Amino acid sequence: MIDRQAQGVALGFLAALSWGVYNVGAEIGQASGFRPADLTLLRYGGAALLMAPLLILARHRLPPLRRVAFLALLVGPLFALAFNEGFQRAPLSHAVVIGPGMSMLVANLLDRWTGGQRLGWQRLLGIAVLIGGLLVIASDAPTTRAGRGSVLAGDLFFVLSGSLWGVYVFTMGRWKLPAVETTAAIATLATLVYLPLYLWLWGWPAMAPALWAEQVFYQGAVGGCLAFVIFAAAVIRLGAGRAALFSALVPGSAVLLAIPLAGQWPNATQWAGVAVTTLGLIISLDLRRGLPEGQQAGSRGRGTA
């Protein structure tokens, strides 16, 4: 049990790092001229191409199509477009707080309501510290962002994308589907649905092949494949509530990864935000407990998570 929890924590940290790489890559892609629709296609289309051999080999172990369709609705093109459209309208400071905050809130509330267990004081304290760390990082972010539309509309897009991700985390925790096969199936189905719509509404932009290859790596290999598989494995080991907490580490990991990837060094405020979010995660996970959260209450006769 302890080994399984340790694996889940390690996978959660690795998933946060992967999402950090993806976020830095998305920033680079937008600066290079890619539109949100282009990055969305690369995220799912790139993942589908890369995982096609695995999908063929594992075709007899794929989850039911209705479940794949539901998950693709949650974290497919709708999720990516909502996040990217919000990123175009609202300040970065809103993105790093609203998205992860909604993901943690939705996943933990669904876990609480369906499991009949109240959130323990340590989980609540940790979430509060995590949000505090996000606010520290957000306080140093740019207050304006070149884009179109109202800031409120951008915030609502972040609420939507964060909520969709929270429901996805909860659902994966309940269904316990195989990480690799499920990720490959989601990417393939999302691409089949999105590609005709993309070609009809937006069309293929004229970009240098090297830029396409760079974004296939960031969007498809890292964001669409690696991060999804790792995070799904973390959900299976930790449960939805705990795994969702790692969403709060993504802004901090992006800050750190911007050093080697974009040559941007964090300042004192950003370092403080990274430290506070990490502390909040440690408090929330309560690593002193060796049993998974679903068995803690039964073995100790308590109703806390």
Image (cartoon, rainbow, N blue to C red):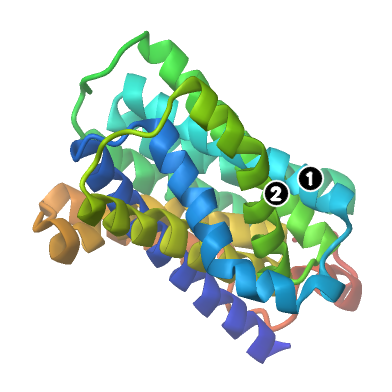
Q: Residue furthest top?
A: 150
Left or right placement of residue 190 versus residue 117 in this view: left
Q: Residue 180: x percent and y percent?
A: 66, 71
Q: Residue 71: x percent and y percent?
A: 74, 47
Q: Residue 297: x percent and y percent?
A: 85, 68
The front one of 115 and 34 is 34
**Which quarter shows the N terminus?**
bottom right
Q: Secondary structure at mark 2?
A: helix
Q: Secondary structure at mark 1?
A: helix
Residue position marked by numbered label 2 in the rendering: 189
Left or right placement of residue 298 versus residue 104 in this view: right
| Image position of 261 with respect to 32: above or below | below
**Which quarter shows the C terminus?**
bottom right
* Distance between mark 1 and mark 2 Cα atoms: 7 Å
Q: Residue at x 31, y 12 (%)?
A: 148
Mark 2: amino acid: Leu
Q: Residues within 10 Å of mark 2 (few under 14, many from 20)?
A: some
Q: Quadrant of residue 88?
A: top left
Residue position marked by numbered label 1 in the rendering: 69
Sequence-wise first label, 1 or 2: 1
The front one of 79 and 238 is 79
